[in-house]
Amino acid sequence: MRLEGQKVLITGGSAGIGLALARLFLQAGCQVAICGRDRTRLETAARDVGASPIRADLADRGDLAAMPGSVQDAMGGLSILVNNAGVQFNYDFGSTPSPEIAAMMDQEIRNNLEAPTILVSQLLPMLSEVPEAAVVNVSSVLALVPKASAPVYCATKAGLRSLSKALRYQFDDAGARIKVFEVLPPVVDTDMTRGRGTDKISPEDVAVATLDGMAKDRYEIRVAKANLLYWIHSLAPGLAERALRGS
Ligand SMILES: NC(=O)c1ccc[n+]([C@@H]2O[C@H](COP(=O)([O-])OP(=O)(O)OC[C@H]3O[C@@H](n4cnc5c(N)ncnc54)[C@H](OP(=O)(O)O)[C@@H]3O)[C@@H](O)[C@H]2O)c1
């Protein structure tokens, strides 16, 4: 798809992969709005790159309901929704008290799966108004195979992957001009992975692969090692599962 001139909302655009995406969309000639919870970090990031800040907590249904109005005010419309914000908690079901698990899984499910779903439905009227639109869902290589330490995170990413495919079918069947992209990064060097993981790629690498994939209408954007893992999983699922189980 053509990228120049698009109006782009990036959730979680104040740090990590989202901020790198914001920079690159702006360089490609887009108008960009970014959202996040921490107002100071959001406004600083927005000022640094030249994006519009939208303060919102995606786990809050009221903030989600306000999003179409905020996007309209910030950019006067929308053509690309990037569902990027996500949270990950590592916990062991055998040793973590049940109320703690409930609190963490609530955040993971709301941020990683519920918010993208609600945003697509709420912003669809705006996306439908333009000649060419896109939804970009940032899932993970862990959408293909889970790791033991983050069961609910992996489940939400597998859910987001499934949602992306089903929405692609729906828009396609309806003749809607809305493309659905899924981005599957491997381990990336951001706040989310601070103090863990090895052999990380940079958020900028993910952003470059994403815009390149979008420009070529490649709907599944498997970044770097995620592509290798995808093929291993297709040919020898057990091998891929063993490789990621303890990662
Ligand atoms: N890092 C990796 O290795 C990796 C690998 C595969 C996939 N991913 C996925 O890539 C996406 C981005 O990850 P990242 O590593 O860039 O994360 P990050 O560095 O931790 O940044 C997360 C961003 O999301 C925002 N955010 C978090 N919770 C939010 C909420 N409830 N409402 C609004 N904004 C919220 C954060 O701002 P505030 O905290 O101020 O709200 C921040 O801007 C996530 O979906 C993640 O699952 C990451």
Image (cartoon, rainbow, N blue to C red):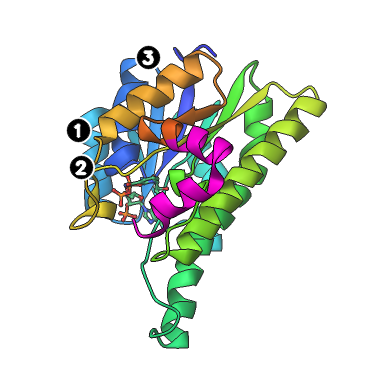
**Observer-nearest residue: 157 or 127?**
157
Q: Which mark is residue 29?
A: 3
- State which region is magenta: 229-247
Q: SS of the residue at dot 1? A: helix
Q: According to the image, label 1 marks what residue?
A: 48
Q: Quadrant of residue 166?
A: top right
Depicted 35 relative to depicted 234: above or below? below
Depicted 229 relative to depicted 36: above or below? above
Q: Are marks 1 and 2 in contact (CB under 8 Å)?
A: yes
Q: According to the image, label 2 marks what residue?
A: 44
Three-letter amino acid code at the position of disc 3: Gly
In whole angstroms, how far apart are the C-alphas of marks 3 and 2? 21 Å
Asked if the magenta segment contains residue 170, the reply would be: no
Give the quarter of the figure containing the N terminus: top right
Asked if the magenta segment contains residue 246, the reply would be: yes
Q: Which mark is residue 2?
A: none
Residue at point 63% right, 32% down? 126
Relative image position of residue 95 (x, y in whole percent): 38, 85
Depicted 7 relative to depicted 229: above or below? above
In whole angstroms, how far apart are the C-alphas of marks 1 and 2? 6 Å
